[in-house]
Amino acid sequence: MKTRKNKKIRNKTAKIYAIPSVDKDIKAIIDINAIKNNFNYLKKKAKTDVMPVLKADEYGHGLVGVSQALRKMGVKYLGVATLGEAILLRESGDKGRILAWLYDVDGHELPAAFHMDIDIAIFDEKIIPKFISLIPKNKKIKVTMFVDTGINRAGIPYDKSFDAFIEVSKCDKIIIEGMMSHLVCSEIKNSPIVNEQLRKFRDLRKRLADINIVPPLVHIANTNGCLNYDVSDFTLSRAGGGIYGLSDGEIDKHLKLVMTVKTYIIQLKDVNKGEGIGYNWKYITPKKMRVAVLPIGYADIIPRSASGKLYVYINGTKRKVLGLISMDQIIVEAKKTDKINDNNVIIFGNGNNCPQTIFDVAKKGDAFPIEILCHTGYRINRNYINK
């Protein structure tokens, strides 16, 4: 009864009211073929199977849309950070393997997840008794043990992990499906820190095997772990940013950027010489200028910190963004050939359809590319293409 009540409350509070797609003025074009390329490349580099990590609304690319595309590609495992994300995937109709590793052991999501066949990570040895007590009768829960090998975030401390495995293995309602950890700085090749993490992780695996605890899914590598380290002796890797063409280190030319962001011109106007544009008049016109107003701003995806440095591309030509970037609009240089409703306005692309990429926008905004993409606003309409 308690679980059904929790489910009713969860479904009631999960109802979402959203702007219809046809009423959204900004387009994020998501290239499914690029995702397929990146998945296959990372799988080849790692020499393991790959679990795409879809947390933070798929790094801004759309949780449900991309997950459906990945399943059509035959991807077996999906990872998310929170149980809420895993539940959302289940409610969208996903029936495959999903792993989540962050939750409140006292919250309503855990009992719901037990009934949805979601793989759940145990990230704290102190919650094990409570976790076990919540498992319904006649249920077998697939569990992954999340071990902290040095990053000192969520995870069972390494020196307590062996005993935690033994404790969990004694519960007949749990199947230990996985063993995972997370790398500190895998963008650095041959890092002593990462090498020590790998050594500890392998040593734990060996000690567990000696007592016949052999999880089938063993994974520690993120995108840069796949690219920079030999992880071929593990059975799985977790790639997040790399699925979308991103890596933390030097840009890998084999990874293809997935998202292109476009908008359109809503107004054209002439501004006299010596007048200011935007808040605080941070830009003063050096001559009489024609400018275009675009309905996109820092509420959507553009970092305000890129003010004074950012460009966009209209009909293939580079245009300077003038003045401070506002919440809902930016002002750019215009040409006589520009027209109202012209929709060939690209904020950033994949390097082929537009020279400016998310890496360039991030550099101008002194930001992290993934950080910008994770802030993709709800006013952006995602279009999934497969050409």
Image: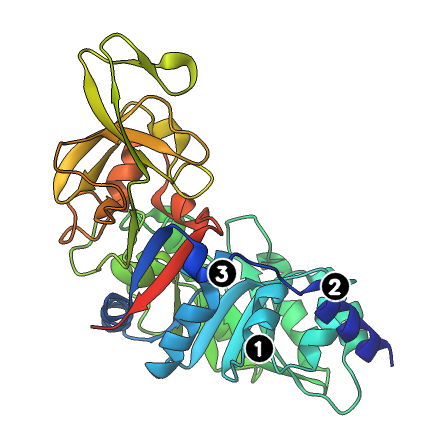
**Mark 2 or 1: the one toward you:** 1
Q: Amino acid at mark 3?
A: Pro
At 68% from the left and 87% from the top, the residue drawn is: 140
Q: Which residue is mark 1?
A: 90
Q: Are marks 1 and 3 in contact (CB under 8 Å)?
A: no
Say what secondary structure mark 1 lies in.
helix
Q: Amino acid at mark 2?
A: Val
Q: Point out the tag, 1 or 3, that comes first from the N-terminus.
A: 3
Q: Which mark is residue 105?
A: 2
Q: Quadrant of residue 14?
A: bottom right
Q: Is residue 166 visible?
A: yes
In the image shown, does 172 or 294 lie closer to the viewer? 294
Front residue (pair 54, 279): 279
Closer mark to the observer between disc 3 and disc 2: 3
Q: How is the image coloured?
A: rainbow
Residue drawn at x 61%, y 68% as measured from the top left: 162
Q: Nearer the viewer, mark 1 or mark 3?
A: 3
Q: Residue furthest top?
A: 274
> Marks 3/2: CA distance?
35 Å
Q: Quadrant of the C terminus?
A: bottom left
Crowding near the residue tagged with mark 2, few <14, some 14–19, many ≥20 C-alpha atoms within 10 Å:
some
Mark 2 and mark 1 residues within 8 Å of each other at the beta carbon? no
Disc 3: which residue: 20
Q: What amino acid is labelled 1 in the image?
A: Arg
Percent position (x, y) of residue 372? 40, 43
Q: Of 238 and 113, which appears nearest the observer?
A: 113
